[in-house]
Amino acid sequence: AIKSGAALCWGYNGFGELGNGTESGEAPNSSPQPVKNLTSCVTKIATGAYASCALQGGKLLCWGSNSNGNLGNGTYDNSNVPVPVSNMDSGVVDVALSANYDETLSTCALKAEKVGTTGAFCWGLNASGQLGLGDTSEDYYNQPQAVQWGDGLTNTGVTAIGVGDLFACAIKNDEVYCWGENSSAQLGVGDTVSRNYPTKVNGNFNGRKPVTLAVGTWS
C-alpha cells in the first residue's frame, strides 16, 4: 500500500519481500511495515510471489526473492531492502510482476526514453519467451531487456503492460499484443502455439480502443 507517499507492506516475509530489512521466515507480519528508504514520493507499488517493486519519482526499485533475476539489478541475490533496477533510474511510469503461485518469474516495466516515446522492458525467466525478445536462447536475464516488436515496429507507443504466469501483454498504438506461453490460449491469437515475440490479439474490441488491461495467471 501507499500512504502519504510512503510504501508499506505486510504478510509473509520469508525472502525479504516486505522490504523492511528483515526476513522473518514462516512468521508473517500482521501489521503494515514501512519499506526501507521508500518513505516519500512513491507513486506505485506492485507485488508478485515473494517479490515487490515500487516507483519513486520515476525510478524503479525492487526487493524480495531474486532466483530468476526478476529484481533486475544484475544479480540473482535476494534483497530484503529495495534495490535500484539497472537502467531504470528515471522515466519509469509502470511496472508489473508475474503471478506464479510459488515464485516471481519475470518483471516488466514501461519507461519513457523521451517525451511521448514510452517503451516496454522485461527481465527474469525467459524459458517460454515471456520477455518478448524474439528468442529463448537465454533462459534468464537479470537486467531489463527491450521488448522486440518485429515487423519494423519500434519500442515506442506502449501505454499499458501486464504480466501473467509465463506470458505478458501490452497495449501499443491502441492495439493489444501478447507473448509467451499459450497452452491455454491466453495470448488470444486464435491458437495455442506459444510466441516469443509480441503478437497482435485477435478481435476488434467492438470498435473501441483499449486503454487498460488485466492479466491473470493463465488468462
Image (tube, grey):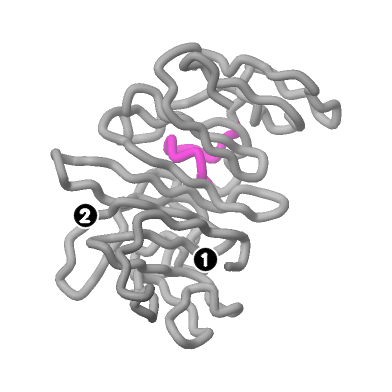
Query: Badge 2: how crowded within 10 Å, few (<14), some, or many (20+)?
Result: some
- The kind of residue on which mark 2 rests is Gly
Task: Answer whether labels 1 and 2 touch (C-beta < 8 Å).
Answer: no
Q: Position of residue 178 (x, y in %)?
A: 41, 68
Instruction: Please tell me which residue is depicted at 49% across the width and 84% down the height of the picture.
Output: 193
Tell me where residue 15 sits by quadrant: top right
Q: Position of residue 70 (x, y in %)?
A: 51, 44
Q: Secondary structure at mark 1?
A: loop
**Image depth: mark 1 or mark 2 in front:** 2
Label 1 vs label 2: CA separation? Answer: 26 Å
User: Quadrant where the C terminus lies?
Assistant: bottom right
Q: Is residue 166 magenta?
A: no
Q: Position of residue 154 (x, y in %)?
A: 17, 61
The secondary structure that dominates the magenta segment is loop
Magenta residues, start to end: 69-78
Q: Is residue 77 magenta?
A: yes
Q: Please identify the residue farthest to the right as the structure is shown.
A: 27
Mark number for residue 185? none
Instruction: Say above or below: 7 vs 214.
Output: above
Instruction: Please tell me which residue is depicted at 41% across the width and 71% down the height of the picture.
Output: 196
Q: Nearer the viewer, residue 166 or 65?
A: 166
Q: Secondary structure at mark 2?
A: loop
Query: Badge 1: how crowded within 10 Å, few (<14), some, or many (20+)?
Result: some
**In-image side of 50 versus 43 (left or right):** right
Residue holding disc 1: 127
Residue holding disc 2: 157
**In-image side of 104 versus 213 (left or right):** right
**In-image side of 152 versus 39 (left or right):** left
Instruction: Please tell me which residue is depicted at 85% across the width and 31% down the height of the picture.
Output: 26
User: Quadrant where the N terminus lies?
Assistant: top right
- The kind of residue on which mark 1 rests is Ala
Q: Nearer the viewer, residue 183 or 204?
A: 204
